[in-house]
Amino acid sequence: MRRSLRESPPNETLWKGILLRLSLAAMLAGASGAIAGSVWLATKLMVDPDGLHWLSKRLPQWTRIALEDPHAPQTLEEIRTRIQASGRVAAEPVSLTAQSQAGDLLLPVLKERPAPCEVQCRQIVELRVYQRLSEDRLVADRSMGDRTLYYLAEQVAVSGPPESFAIAPLVEANAVADGSTRPLPLTNIQRLTENAPQEGVWLNLIGERPAGDTQLAYGQLFLYNGDRYHLSLMLQWSSPGGQLPYWQEFTGGGTAEFLVERTVGLEPDFEVYRLQPRNFLLNPVQLQPISLTEAALESRTYKNALLLARSGLWSPAQQILESIRLRSGTQWTPEAQAQLDAIAFHADVTRTQASASWASPSQKLLAALLDGRWRQGLETLDAHLDRRSDIVQMLAADTDRLWRRIDAAVRVNPTEEEAVVWGVVVLALQQDRPRAIAWLRERENVSAETFDRAVRLLNQLQLGSPGLDEAWDFEEETQDAIEVTGGRP
């Protein structure tokens, strides 16, 4: 039988199979080599990100641009030029070592702010950490010359605190309306060195804006861990009076605390943060506020002291805690001492204000009441009844924070009769005279003398018209006492 003309001879078919197998083997070998090379290249980049700049120099000229490492070591001037080419500006570098220009640098990156921008028209949008190239690297690659070179070690985008956070102290004081969630610009940076802990380099980013009659300051605190080349945002802060936060040894433990002043007017407000360890490799520390919410000791009296402090009665709270400390002995804990120190810090301010010489009787009276000096406040009021119009106006503007103090004082000590008298006055201003008299009648153990004094003070201040139920009913009180005691004297 004849073979078809289209059928290939046996030898030709055999060779085609061999060539196909060889082609597949070559392709597999090339793919394996490419994968192995990629793995090696990736490992090399992770171990030494800037160690492959030599590769570009050994390739043809036309391939260098495509393979050039954007993070290759550069001079400071080259870094500035590259940042400027991106439409931004490099600010003055901040040294991250003891000697300027001798080691790592922090380079803030700025961008133009939209008009109107008051004084500072640029804001910080990025923080870059540049590590100085070691002498060993310079010697190993002499093509770099004798220039001081840096390569990028860390890069963090910056967005300021929201407006609502920055103006929160003023909102609480009813000085401004609620703010928005838009981030506020940060325009300046400072390295904190005085009393600062040695755990790293502390950097304070700062912004300012007008708020009513004050210049509000706000910002963010960063920590640079030089061992890990890591920047961490530690906290955001705000100061209505424009005071910059600072490090100060506060609790006497040998390590400084971070203090943020949020005072508005005569109301002292300081946030105190302690440095605490945490299990995080890149940043093994954190800042925790000294809180007055949770009591350090399980004691009703201790908790009452914290209630007074949270209400603004710092001096009475300090007196109670001091007495507990003297009785506690070895049971007194570092946490309790930290709370006492925070309260005493505020109490120093209110005591100084209450003892100061004020030109205005209303200011003198307010300072006394804010420190819980109820009797001194009544004496000041009695001595300046001719200025009752100014005094009533002042009291009416501060009823919320005054009532917060009075309510706490009466809850802790119901027999604080001078505080009860002021409670009647504040309630009459905050609500009305009948509600104030009703609250007075609800108080237990209120004497006829205190009742008459409160009513007389309302009349002197001309707060509402006297009602028919404002007389002290001695027969009713006596009958109530007989029913409670069963007729026993």
Image (cartoon, grey):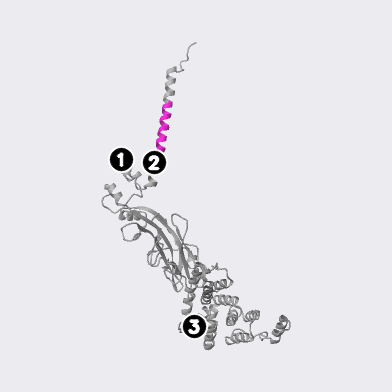
Sequence-first disc among 2 and 3: 2
Residue 31: horizontal and vertical position, in percent? Answer: 42, 35
First in sequence: mark 2 or mark 1? 2
Q: Quadrant of the C terminus?
A: bottom right
Q: Is residue 21 magenta?
A: yes
Query: What residue is shown at x 42% (from left), y 31% (from top)?
Result: 27
Above or below residue 478? Residue 11 is above
- In the structure shown, which secondary structural element does the residue marked by tag 1 occupy? loop
Residue type for callout 2: Trp
In the image, the segment drawn in magenta is 20-37
Q: Is residue 481 magenta?
A: no
Q: What residue is rendered at 42% in x and 61% in y? A: 222
The amino acid sitting under disc 3 is Lys
Type of residue at label 1?
Pro
Per the image, the residue denoted by label 2 is 40
Magenta portion: prevailing SS class: helix
Among numbered discs 3 and 1, the one appearing first in the sequence: 1
Q: Residue tagged by mark 3?
A: 364
Callouts 2 and 1 close, C-beta under 8 Å: no
| Residue closest to the eye, 302 or 376 | 302
How far from the left and from the top, in percent, is residue 78?
31, 53
Instruction: Name the residue tied to disc 1.
Output: 60
Q: Choose mark 2 or mark 1, whichever is in front.
A: 2
- Residue found at the far top of this picture: 1
How many numbered discs?
3
Image depth: mark 2 or mark 3 in front: 2
Res 38 seen here: yes
Instruction: Determine contact: label 2, label 3, CB under 8 Å.
Output: no
Q: What distance separates the C-alpha of mark 3 from that of mark 1?
A: 83 Å
In terms of depth relative to the viewer, which is nearer, 295 or 167?
Answer: 295
Residue 177 showing in the rendered view:
no
